[in-house]
Image (cartoon, rainbow, N blue to C red):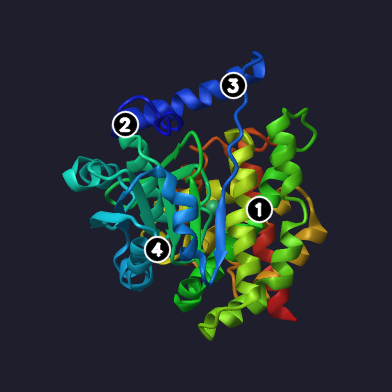
Amino acid sequence: MIANRYPEKELDSSNIAILNGILIAMNLRKKEMDISISVNLPSFTIGPDAYDDIKKYAGFAGEKVAIIGGQTALEKALPRLKPAIQAAGLTITAIEWYGGEASYSNIDHLAALNQVQAADMIFAVGGGRAIDTGKTVSAKLEKPVFTFPTIASNCAPTSAVCVLYNDDHESAGSYRLHAPAVHSFSDSTIIAEAPEQYIWAGIGDAISKEMEVSFSAEGRELAYNNTIGVHIVQGANQRVLKNGLAALEAAKAHQESPAIDNILFEILGTTSYTSVLVDHDYNGHFAHSFYYGVTVLPQGERHLHGEIVSYGVLIVLQLAKKYDELKEIRDFMISVGLPTSLKALEIESDEDLKTVLDKAFTLDHIQTSPFEINRQMVEEAIRKVEKLNHSFDAL
Ligand SMILES: [Zn+2]
């Protein structure tokens, strides 16, 4: 019953790539033919007592749980998660480290473990990479997955997309599940205890969604799911701008706070709603292509996804000629210390920028734009975004 929500075919490294191709082909086909549209919105519990709801929302899936998570995440979450699992009447068959990367080899390894296969459901615990590993393992094993974010750096816990990497940490594209995790449990006390850089990066990623989706969809006739996806994210950035600084200060003080919950609603709620609603073509734009580009550089590993994406948002706003929003978002980014220059991302040579753009242009995000965007236009947009720093410095 539950298994029907997950891919029927065995997933491995090669057929994940094939499935990605099929999904893109299906999206194209959807435009040409009248085919069914399925909508599976994220479900979540956010708050200091989120784990108390495990029985309510995961109890139906069986009795046995395999936990897959990050090392620090497991250390932080297990003291609260284990008693909560016990109180829910569930038993744990496995507690496994995800392997340090959301890679095909770690996914294949985890899915082959008897103790993971013996479980009725997967609990994915940690940050984006641990959670995306758990999500992909669940798809491979056709088991329901529940997520337990311990940091708030991106929407992986509630999105259907899994961002995958090679073993050498270079981005290997994404794989989209049929549906997001069945339910996500965000204990905001644990999230407040994490280093503040994660919610900081989460804010950086969150501000990309409204900009990228709106720009991709501009001037297009949209199917129902795309229309709703574009609408639902409007206004998200105003709320992020309103709560961002307070959330970051609470995270610095490791204090659970309504501002953190308000940011979590945007990261795990609004942006994920959009992400699961819209077709792949509308789900991202050049801010995310730019991120994938930066992952090719060694310094890419020293910067978080949302941190890199936020700089890319400035490029998108420049391309879109949305100068008021560019100023507003950029001022906010300065106030919270998100990068407004390539230098802040350690991209200082023309050669490095060329490497980033070479990779970025292998992605298809910009193909869905209100007008044709070529490399020269992107280079020009970057030059203009960089120039803002020089005039700022000169003041
Ligand atoms: Zn992102």
Residue type beneath disc 2: Leu
Give the residue at mark 3.
28
| Element assignment for label 2 | loop
Classify residue 51 as left or right of residue 394. left
Give the residue at mark 4.
299
| Element assignment for label 3 | helix
Q: Identify the mark nearer the N-term, 4 or 2.
A: 2
**Residue 171 place in picture, x, y as percent:** 39, 47
Can you tell me whether the CB of the residue at mark 1 lies under 8 Å from the nearest atom of ligand 1? no
Which quadrant, please, contains the N terminus? top left
The dot on residue 270 is 1
Which quadrant, please, contains the C terminus? bottom right
Q: Nearer the viewer, mark 1 or mark 4?
A: 1
- Count residues near mark 2 (Cα–Cα under 10 Å), then give few for <14, some for 14-19, many for 20+: many
| Element assignment for label 1 | helix
Residue type beneath disc 3: Leu
Cα–Cα span, label 1 and label 2: 29 Å
Residue type beneath disc 4: Gln
- Count residues near mark 1 (Cα–Cα under 10 Å), then give few for <14, some for 14-19, many for 20+: many
Give the residue at mark 2.
11
Q: Identify the mark nearer the N-term, 1 or 4.
A: 1
- Count residues near mark 4 (Cα–Cα under 10 Å), then give few for <14, some for 14-19, many for 20+: few
Q: Is residue 48 above or below residue 24?
A: below
